[in-house]
Amino acid sequence: MLPIHSPKPPSSTTKATTTPELNSIERKNSSSSFRSQNSFVFPNSNRLWLLLVIVSLQIIILLMARGLPLSHRRTHFPSPLSYDHKPVQNPANFSTHRSKSANISISSTVSSPPDRCSSGRIFVYDLPAVFNKELLDNCADLDPWHSRCEALSNGGFGREAAGLSGVIPEGLVPAWYWTDQFAMEVIYHNRVLSHECRTTEPDSAMAFYIPFYAGLAVGKYLWLGYSSKDRDRYCEMMLEWIKDQPYWNRSDGWDHFMTMGRITWDFRRSKNEDWGSSCIYMPGMRNITRLLIERNPWDYFDVVVPYPTGFHPRSDSDIVHWQNFVRNRRRKTLFCFVGAPRAAIKNDFRGLLLNHCNNASGSCKAADCTGSRCSNGTSVILQTFLDSDFCLQPRGDSFTRRSVFDCMIAGSIPVFFWHRTAYLQYQWFLPNDPKSYSVFIHRDLVKNGTSSIKTVLQSYSKQEINQMREKVIQYIPKLVYAKPEKGLNNTKDAFDIAIDGVLKRIKEQEQPGFKWK
């Protein structure tokens, strides 16, 4: 279901009277009252004493008034970073800050609960259906070889997982789906529509979400000789539409964000004959915050989020149950490798890792994914990771790969060979200290035979392995996308962390003197 409200242009209103003027009026009234009291006629001896008493009382009252908290004395003076459910009627009067200007009583200030949307609210554009709904309706045409309808069903989770009985606890089987790695746009759109900080009044929004399925739109034109114009068409149409919106023009897109469910390089074509679309390079895209499954580490506006995996917990208890399961799992092998060699690539590193694993004398379990052996719909990948202490994670077709998250969800410790596979990517979602949850072996040491993967991993004690695994398990909630559209009750998943981070970024961008990196 898509939002039914369209943006409304800002309306005007008058400014509220500020309290410093009221304070000055009160002080004038106090002075006149003092003068009128002086006009009374008393006997000489008592008149002086009474005058001294009145002056002393006035001084005490004045000092007490000055000692009150500022928020109790100036209830009409708005905080520039406070936000309310009601829209500000005249954003032009507040520059880039959308402050609330309203009378706040002392009692309401003290007793009101903390605002869970203190970082701001989100307005979701009601885009024309051609940019999202029609793409889903025509899911059979999104791939030149087979239908994507099953992969995009169930709100982007795909079909319910089968064949997991006996592999994982029976009570957790309904939380598993065969989720496609490129379904992120659909998952995020459904969650944003149900977000507790979503607003249907654009005047009250801190951030504006553009629900354009850019990854699905370009995916159908990446093969079979389609032209660069074909690959650019949807993005160009979206930008033409968004530039006509008043809230886009107010900020030139600085407070707008969107999801692009593929890697950033699929949208960074610099020459017509190159791969992908040129969407990110188009005028108008420069200031939009873009959520992707792999980012350009040198582009501030690229924000990377975890690849969708198959585990979509239904509740907080599902998270705890799964963490306990992988924590107590008896693992049969030291390390594993899941992947297919790239025969067409000279000195293919994946093929090298597969050979290392096969030659490891029972210490490594290999899942050769040549063909469709590891496609969505089999439990091979999950079982392999569940059975191993470590999992080898080379780069994929790009620097990152979904397998990193499949590995960590299973409680296996990732072994990286490129820094850009994880360390320069998922800062919001992974521990700050790479050594606390992973192992790094430079690929050149493996290629020239200087380093033996088996020897390196055998050097870790059981205690060190358990500590790293515990860190991986601790971070599992941050790597999964929960099943309820409103999220979990007490646990923040990958979506929650991503949205919180986007709102924080946009809020920081509105501060005076902000400079993006």
Image (spheres, rainbow, N blue to C red):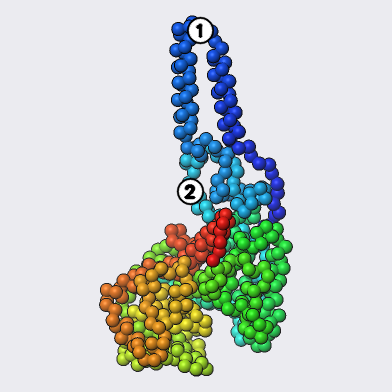
Marks 1 and 2, how far apart at CA: 56 Å
Residue 336 location, quadrant: bottom left
Amino acid on which disc 2 is placed: Pro
Mark closest to the chain's N terminus, 1 or 2: 1
Which is more toward the observer, 174 or 95? 95
| Vertical position of residue 33 compared to residue 376: above or below | above
Image location of residue 330, percent across then percent down: 31, 77
Image location of residue 69, percent across then percent down: 47, 37
Q: Is residue 124 left or right of residue 434?
A: right
Instruction: Give the foreground label among 1 and 2.
Output: 1
Image location of residue 28, percent across then percent down: 58, 25
Image location of residue 244, percent across then percent down: 72, 62
According to the image, label 1 marks what residue?
42
Amino acid on which disc 1 is placed: Phe
Q: Secondary structure at mark 1?
A: loop
Q: Is residue 442 left or right of residue 230?
A: left
Q: Which quadrant would the N terminus be assigned to in this image?
A: bottom right
Q: Is residue 355 left or right of residue 230?
A: left
Tell me, yes or no, if residue 3 can be seen here.
no
Q: Secondary structure at mark 2?
A: loop
The dot on residue 114 is 2
